[in-house]
Image: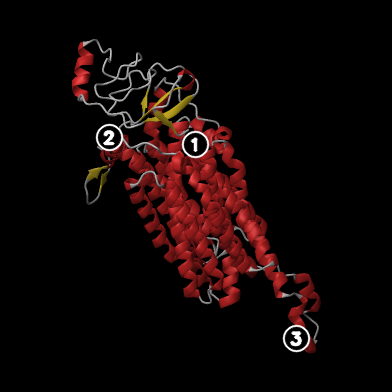
């Protein structure tokens, strides 16, 4: 007999066994995986954004840019007649310009490193699976967060920020790929990734007030130590949940499918347009995050907690945007491109409004609108990337979500650096006008995604069954996906199946190689063998080299 837990009077060993049994259940396990991935994404984005109200003010407080040697030379001089012109020795524009550039480089270092590591992380995830790279990423995030807590110089904080980029390249990519792998059904995948995006939103928007309040009342180390503890707990949960499946995979002798190389995926025009949309959707935040704090401090004398709190209300429209997109895609599954285009236009308009705000309350509104637009784009594009891989490549998701992570990293790598230079040279207003024009000009490109999905869903697709029908005994090589033009059959499929079984499973009433069709069905091409009754076929794959006449079909490759 083991130890009994007080109050509930349950043996620890028995409770542990119950937990393991629950973890082995596929439905429970994938829900736990979703929770763990959401916590990891929450952690990474909180660690990214928590420094927004802390680091610029902290670096100024330790005189990171103050030219102390010159001050020391003059501090003992009793030249009272110079008091009125004292500040002309160090003009405010130059001082703020140096701050903007240095803070921008610090912010961008994480994304630059993440950009360089992502191709490697995507390839390793495709080969090793999703759990071990994610645990590695969480451990690296744990280390970088600890360094942030105790770092007191610009260079130490720069190193911690760069190390976070390595951890994010593994944790974020593996997490999104794991969701796509566990949720194969399109609607379920959109819903799961929408939940993950809600956690990303909460992390991004809750972290600034979280960091600002704790920094002001408890010190710099406290918010980072709490996030470090969260990384440790999440990594332990992932290890316990994935251990049974890892042992099961090792016992199987089946060869793991090889994913499509990342360089081939990035050459896919659909994936390329999706990646560009993710870049443009995140340019606005990437440019605003390192510059808006100093702009608010200079224009409206905002305090640290006000700078942090300006982001928090935007969480609610972001979640509303995620929810709205999931519902729209459930009802209108072919409208990703349109939803994404609307999101970009909404973002562009909000950026145009921000620099003309004159008080703290007014800034909140366009930021809320901006985050609503980001939610529309991200929630539409992320499931679409998994879908494109399913129908055009191998259903292994590490590399495609590494491309998504690269897209985010591009915005956050060059955004802060470029934004700091623009603000220092021509000002905050022209920065936002530039974002408005660039985002608005990209939106029409999304029209090219309108043909990605040109078939209706199967009736059983939302129930988790495989909706893709593949021709049996197909030769290796190139495949294309086609859609039948309203082929219908008048004979019930159950009766046809019985007749086929009576004839030894020859499948005379399916689409035969000799050109036979079901009674009342439209003529079909002879290369469709052993597919199913014509009334249920929506799309199949075939060897394009064997096609002589495909006039009855519409290609969307």
Vertical relation: 346 (above or below) 21 = below
Number of the front mark, 1 or 3: 1
Disc number placed over residue 460 in the picture, else none:
2
Please indicate whether residue 158 sits to the left or right of residue 458 in the image.
Answer: right
Secondary structure beneath dot 1 equals: helix
Q: Quadrant of the N terminus?
A: top left
Distance of label 2 from label 1 (alpha carbons): 27 Å
- Give percent across and percent down for residue 468: 36, 29
Distance of label 1 from label 3 (alpha carbons): 62 Å
- Give the residue displayed 70% in from the left and 70% down from the top: 95
Disc number placed over residue 520 in the picture, else none:
none
Q: Nearer the viewer, residue 401 or 214?
A: 401
Q: Are marks 2 and 1 in contact (CB under 8 Å)?
A: no
Number of the front mark, 2 or 1: 2
Q: Earlier in the sequence, mark 3 or mark 2?
A: 3
Q: Earlier in the sequence, mark 2 or mark 1?
A: 1
Secondary structure beneath dot 3 equals: helix
- Give the residue displayed 38% in from the left and 52% down from the top: 325
- Give the residue displayed 37% in from the left and 32% down from the top: 244
Distance of label 3 from label 2 (alpha carbons): 80 Å
Please indicate whether residue 188 sits to the left or right of residue 436 in the image.
Answer: left
Circle 1 Cα neighbour tier, 10 Å, few/some/many (<14 / 14–19 / ≥20):
many
Q: Nearer the viewer, residue 172 or 151?
A: 172
Circle 2 Cα neighbour tier, 10 Å, few/some/many (<14 / 14–19 / ≥20):
few
Q: Earlier in the sequence, mark 1 or mark 3?
A: 3
Vertical relation: 52 (above or below) 494 = below
- Residue 543 seen: yes
- Give percent across and percent down for residue 292: 57, 67
Count of marks overlaid on the render: 3
The part of the image, by quadrant, that contains residue 269 is top right
Vertical relation: 130 (above or below) 277 = above
Disc number placed over residue 398 in the picture, else none:
1
């Amino acid at each position: 007999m083991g130890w009994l837990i007080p109050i509930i009077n349950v043996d620890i060993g028995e409770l542990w066994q119950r937990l393991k049994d629950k973890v082995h259940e596929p439905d429970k396990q994938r829900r736990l995986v979703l929770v763990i991935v959401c916590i990891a994404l929450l952690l990474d984005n909180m660690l990214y954004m928590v420094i927004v109200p802390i680091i610029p003010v902290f670096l100024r407080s330790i005189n990171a840019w103050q030219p102390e040697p010159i001050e020391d030379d003059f501090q003992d001089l009793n030249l009272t007649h110079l008091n009125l012109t004292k500040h002309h020795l160090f003009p405010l524009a130059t001082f703020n310009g140096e701050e903007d550039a240095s803070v921008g480089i610090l912010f961008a270092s994480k994304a630059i490193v993440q950009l360089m590591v992502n191709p490697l992380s995507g390839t390793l995830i495709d080969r090793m699976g999703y759990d071990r790279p994610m645990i590695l990423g969480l451990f690296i995030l744990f280390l970088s967060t600890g360094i942030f807590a105790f770092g007191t110089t610009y260079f130490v904080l720069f190193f911690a920020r760069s190390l976070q980029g390595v951890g994010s390249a593994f944790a974020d990519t593996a997490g999104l790929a794991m969701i796509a792998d566990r949720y194969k059904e399109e609607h379920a995948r959109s819903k799961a990734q929408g939940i993950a995006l809600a956690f990303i939103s909460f992390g991004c928007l809750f972290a600034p007030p979280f960091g600002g309040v704790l920094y002001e009342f408890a010190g710099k180390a406290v918010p980072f130590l709490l996030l470090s503890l969260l990384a440790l707990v999440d990594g332990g949960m992932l290890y316990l949940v994935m251990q049974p499946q890892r042992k099961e995979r090792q016992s199987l002798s089946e060869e793991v499918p090889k994913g499509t190389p990342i360089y081939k995926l990035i050459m896919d025009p659909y994936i390329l347009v999706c990646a560009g949309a993710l870049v443009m959707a995140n340019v606005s935040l990437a440019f605003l995050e390192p510059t808006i704090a100093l702009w608010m401090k200079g224009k409206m004398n905002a305090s640290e907690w006000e700078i942090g709190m300006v982001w928090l209300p935007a969480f609610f429209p972001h979640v509303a945007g995620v929810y709205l997109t999931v519902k729209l895609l459930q009802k209108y599954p072919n409208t990703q491109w349109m939803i994404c285009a609307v999101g970009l236009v909404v973002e562009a308009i909000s950026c145009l409004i921000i620099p003309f705000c004159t008080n703290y309350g007014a800034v909140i509104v366009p930021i809320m609108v901006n985050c609503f637009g980001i939610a529309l784009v991200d929630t539409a594009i992320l499931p679409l990337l998994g879908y494109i891989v399913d129908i055009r490549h191998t259903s292994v998701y590490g590399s495609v979500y590494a491309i998504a992570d690269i897209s985010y990293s591009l915005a956050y790598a060059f955004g802060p650096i470029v934004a700091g230079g623009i603000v220092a040279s021509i000002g905050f207003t022209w920065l936002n006008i530039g974002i408005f024009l660039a985002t608005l000009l990209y939106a029409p490109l999304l029209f090219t995604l309108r043909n990605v999905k040109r078939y209706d869903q199967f009736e059983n697709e939302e129930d988790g069954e495989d909706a893709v029908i593949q021709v049996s005994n197909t030769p290796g090589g190139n495949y294309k996906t086609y859609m039948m033009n309203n082929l219908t059959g008048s004979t019930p499929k159950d009766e046809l199946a019985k007749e086929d079984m009576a004839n030894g499973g020859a499948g005379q009433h399916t689409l035969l190689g000799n050109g036979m069709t079901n009674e009342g069905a439209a003529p079909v091409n002879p290369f469709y063998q052993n597919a199913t009754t014509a009334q249920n076929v929506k799309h199949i794959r075939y060897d394009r080299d064997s096609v002589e006449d495909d006039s009855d079909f519409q290609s969307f490759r």
